[in-house]
Amino acid sequence: MKAADAIIRCLEEEGVETVFGYPGVAICPFYNSILDSTIKTVLIRTEQNAAHAASGLARVTGRPGVCAVTSGPGATNVITGIATAFADSIPLICITGQVDSTLLGSDVFQEADITGAVESFVKYSYLVRNPEDIPRIFKEAFYIANTGRKGPVLIDIPFDVQNANISRFKYPEEVSLRTYKPTVKGHVVQIKKAVKALEHAKRPVICAGGGVQLSEANAEFRSFVEKHNIPVVSTMMGIGVMPTEHPLYFGMVGNNGKAYANRAMNESDVMIMFGARVADRAISQPDFMLGGKVLIHVDVDPAEIGKIASSTIPIVGDIKHIIGDFEKQEFSVDSELWINTLNRYKETMKPVRRPNPDYVDPAVFIDKLSRKMDADGIYVADVGQNQIWSCAYHVVRNGQFFTSGGMGTMGYSIPAAMGAKIADRNRQVIAVCGDGSFQMSMMELATIKQENAAVKIIVMRNNYLGMVREYQHNAYKDNYSVVDIAGYPDLCKLSAAYDIPYLRLDNMSNADEIIDIFLKEDNTMLLELMIDPYDLVK
Amino acid sequence: MQKKVFQILVDNTSGVLSRISGLFSRRGYNIDSITAGVTADSRFTRITIVTHGDDEILDQIEKQVAKLVDVRDIKELKRDDSIYRELALVKVRTGEDRRQGVMEAVDIYRAKIVDSDRECLTVEITGTQSKIEAFLSLISNYEILELARTGIAGLGRGSENVVYL
């Protein structure tokens, strides 16, 4: 059997349905073999977006997304996508072609040491030298990517290795990794301690992070907090763990979060971090925020516990398992008064905006959009002001919210939304980006068209790199540097060039009508919003 | 700031040493010395790393290293119940008339002369880092032409807590 065929067999064994990528000679044996498979291929327009699309797919399916690119520039282009997935713990398998193994290290055409280059952004990487290792390596790679703290795994396969023959193909039933054994179950003693702390708590708060979603434990989490009446705040990656309007949910924390969410966290006496890593954007002053309270930190990655904040009760394990362990304990939490207080904060600490009536108010627009979109729809926010507005005003009901949280990679939303739509064509998927981030991935309009992936795209146009402009407004007293994006394309013509229907909203007067048209059909559509160039996220 | 010696047992995969050293450099941890070699079972490599930092850093080093897929085990080799050894090769300029002093120092420290010519002696010395430092200080009035040190290799004492081979 040809090694390239074996690779495809491995993907089939893992249930892979779609591969995002871009061919080149060094990955051609792979792309030749995939023709005999039912696995779908998607020709992305630049390699970075292959990883983003695979990330979108992974976040819908809960299985690793797969991308396959060629050696050299193909491989180096994908690095930003890999780093983005790594920062948000998204499981990916990234297959890269490589020059002949006999030529490795001799700087031949399109050679790049990709395993070396991605070392700090992958959970693990392989350079396949022996074609007989292919089944074992793929089995391990999928296992490593999707267990413990999830993340990208890269498999670099030289051209001659893909073309080699292997004596027999047997896909391993089990992995036998001597060195990799992630902790799944929580320590019972620690859980009992945590329960005791909750029983004595007067002002308990749970901060939900992306770990809850990665563990696919949203339902369990919701029923846990409802049963015990514990108020919840979330990180950016934790948006969607709770429905936004759930009576126990008090918003996103952090610099760009809700003031009342931060206050809830501040004033709590017992706080549980569930799958959140005390990131700087969520908790900018950990000593101040977390001092003097019982901090229970639950995470599947032991290195995150104590990295930034020392916790009183550390619990290492998978969130779903640990919620199950909590559920085995009988206890009650007295939080009635505390919740009343938090509701009062929520009422009185609402952000006040003074929108310019000549433009679209992103806050009201996003609120309207999220109420009109399908309840289980997927909202993918890009990076920039659009992201912060989305976090603040998108009302999650039963859907999902994706964004590049850790790395803050502009251009994430369109390819990720496309990956999400391809993963589940029955769900509505909306990408929301700014005019800066749109131009970072607008080449994917062609892929969306080619794949007939009905992604709804919203571009918030303010003719500035808004987030940086806002920073320069505050930090440099409006002394703007390199944030004016003149030369912005006419999106009406651009949409026409791609044969994509186009809508434009100038102000809020006909917002409802435009949103209704935008969402009416399950098709690709581009909606441009005219945003006040001087609007701020806070 | 304190110094710690870690013993790390890893799968002997290609690039494993660069994965470990890369982790140290990208997270800004210090490496005072690093030694590596295969164990009695050739599937594994034992690495001894000497590092320093405050308690939080040292705790993170242990956790981050443990997290690497290739790492089977990491433990601290505590001074009191471990053996540390380092080997150094020292090439000293003696000329033909000043050999005696170096040979005396070699004798006192149970070192060995492993090479010589008319200009110099090359000394092999094994021991704890402080012994090697003391030897070097004793011969400091000689010109050291070249010095090669291996860094610490270490093992815990006794047969308890043996992780593997």
Image (cartoon, coloured by chain):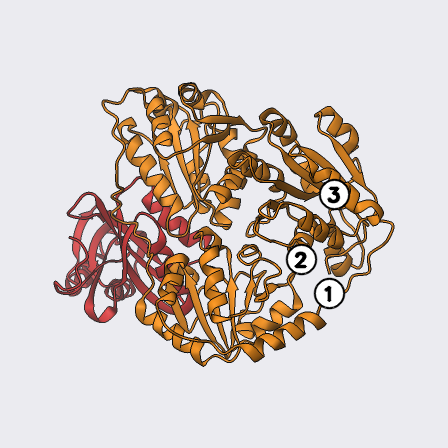
Chain colours: A orange, B red
Q: What residue do we see at 22% from left, 59% from top? A: B154
Which numbered disc flags the more N-terminal residue, 3 or 1?
1
Q: Position of residue A441 (x, y in %)?
A: 64, 35
Name the disc covering residue A392, or none: 2
Residues at marks 2 and 3, CA–CA distance in whole angstroms:
19 Å
Give me the C-alpha separation between circle 2 and circle 1: 10 Å
Dot 1 falls on a residue whose secondary structure is loop
Give the image location of residue A179, x and y in percent.
27, 49
Residue name at image x 20 percent, y 65 percent: B82
Q: Is residue A190 left or right of residue A468?
A: left
Nearer to me, B63 or A275: A275
The tag earlier along the polypeptide, 2 or 1, is 1
Q: Amino acid at mark 1?
A: Pro
Mark 3 and mark 1: span between their CA atoms? 24 Å
- The picture quadrant where one finds residue A321 is bottom left
Name the disc covering residue A515, or none.
Answer: 3
Foreground: disc 3 or disc 1: 3
